[in-house]
Image: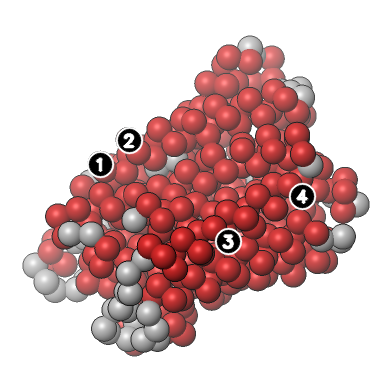
Amino acid sequence: MLLVAASTFVVVAAEMMPVGLLTPMGSSLQVSGGTVGLSLTITGLVAAATAPFVPAVAGRSDRKTVLVVLMALVALANALTAVAPTFAVVACARIVLGAGMGAVWALAASLAPQLIERRSVGAATTLVFSGIAVASVLGVPVGTFVGGVMGWRASFWGLAAAAALVSAAMVVVLPPMRPEARPPLGRVSSVLRRRGVASGLVLTAFLVTAHFAAYTYVRPALERLVGLDGSQIGTMLVVYGVLGVVGTFVVGPVAVRVPKPVCAVLALGIAATLVVLPLAGTWSLVVVAALVGVWGLSYGGVSVSTQSWMAAAAPADRELTSALWVAVFNASIALGALGGGQVYDRAGPTSVFWVAAGFAAVALVVAAVSAPRQDAERLGRPV
């Protein structure tokens, strides 16, 4: 389970890495920060387009073999990014990364029942998705630090090496893993008709879009709004990352049991932080760090809690619901990065944060009026 969590950590860290490296990547590749931000859009769109088909394409193949090949593909994509002379090459590498990342992510959640005893499946699933959450909140600060010391290309070389090591370790550690018996694509329409599944996907879409509309451009925003330099921003991102990890492991076990209130609290925390942070330009660094920390604490639990919502909504179709969730999650990353870039270029960082706060507020409403499982569903009658 730790190895599967490591695989989700590596793929999501690779997806998010440009966030902390926008300025040096743009300077080196001679493109704008908004253009570099499109690397997240490319990866997210490819992952969103491919993830729903992963269970069907993988077919009856041993999931161990599939994961080993996918992690090797992720290693190749990061190595290609590290040597890229132009943004066009980076874009090609990110297409490869998106395909590998979406597939790894889509398969990961369904593996817990095969790797651990039934009574621990909930905790094991939390552990797998903690890899995603920890990468989202810690991968960027670490990559920013490495990039500041050794150059942005070193961050991607590190990711390539990590992916290769995980792939090799999977060959040795993982047992053979059979796929789900039921062909998933034939059940897509029936699963989507469940209110809990549909509301979980909508909730995920608004939360993730809100976060990445703002977070993709957090470095230039903190430079312009608060006047921070590179080392101070690195410190803020470390604060964000540490509290995000805390949020992941505090929220995860609770979200498995009661995802609805947890998702509502997280949406409220993100919305409130994004409203207030643009006003912090004249405040002390301690206050700014506290706001960034609340943001990290709130977003740290989003991956685990929204996936827990999806698992509760359709427990018999974990592989399929995971694939649908991954598709929506990554499409939302792409939408947030793209939309945030457009707002940032046209209206500035304050508008980006407030628009993102509006999306988080919509997520709060969805969490408040919806539930993973309706009464009729609990009785065995799909709604």
Q: What element carries label 1?
A: helix
Which numbered circle lies on residue 201? none
Q: Residue at point 69% right, 14% down?
A: 282
247 left or right, relative to 122: right
Q: Marks 2 and 1, Cα distance to the nearest angstrom?
A: 7 Å
Residue type for callout 1: Val
- Mark 3 = which residue? 164
Q: What residue type is labelled 2?
A: Val
Q: Is residue 175 left or right of residue 78?
A: left
Q: Counting residues from the N terminus, which is met first, the one under dot 1 or under dot 3? A: 3
| Picture quadrant of residue 276 | top right
Say the numbered circle drawn on residue 153: 4
Residue nearest the observer in this picture, 74 or 383: 74
To which residue does mark 1 refer?
Answer: 254
Q: Residue at the location (75% across, 35% down)?
A: 148
Using the rendered image of the protein, determine whether residue 36 is visible from the camera's viewpoint. Answer: yes
Q: Earlier in the sequence, mark 4 or mark 3?
A: 4
Residue at image mark 2: 250
Amino acid carrying mark 4 in the image? Arg
Q: Which of marks 2 and 3 is in front?
A: 3
At x 27% / y 63%, what residue is drawn?
A: 115
**Mark 4 touching mark 2, by CB under 8 A?**
no
- Which is more foreground, mark 4 or mark 3? 3
Disc 2 to disc 3, C-alpha distance: 30 Å
Query: Is label 2 in contact with label 1 (beta carbons under 8 Å)?
Result: yes
Q: Three-letter amino acid code at disc 3?
A: Ala
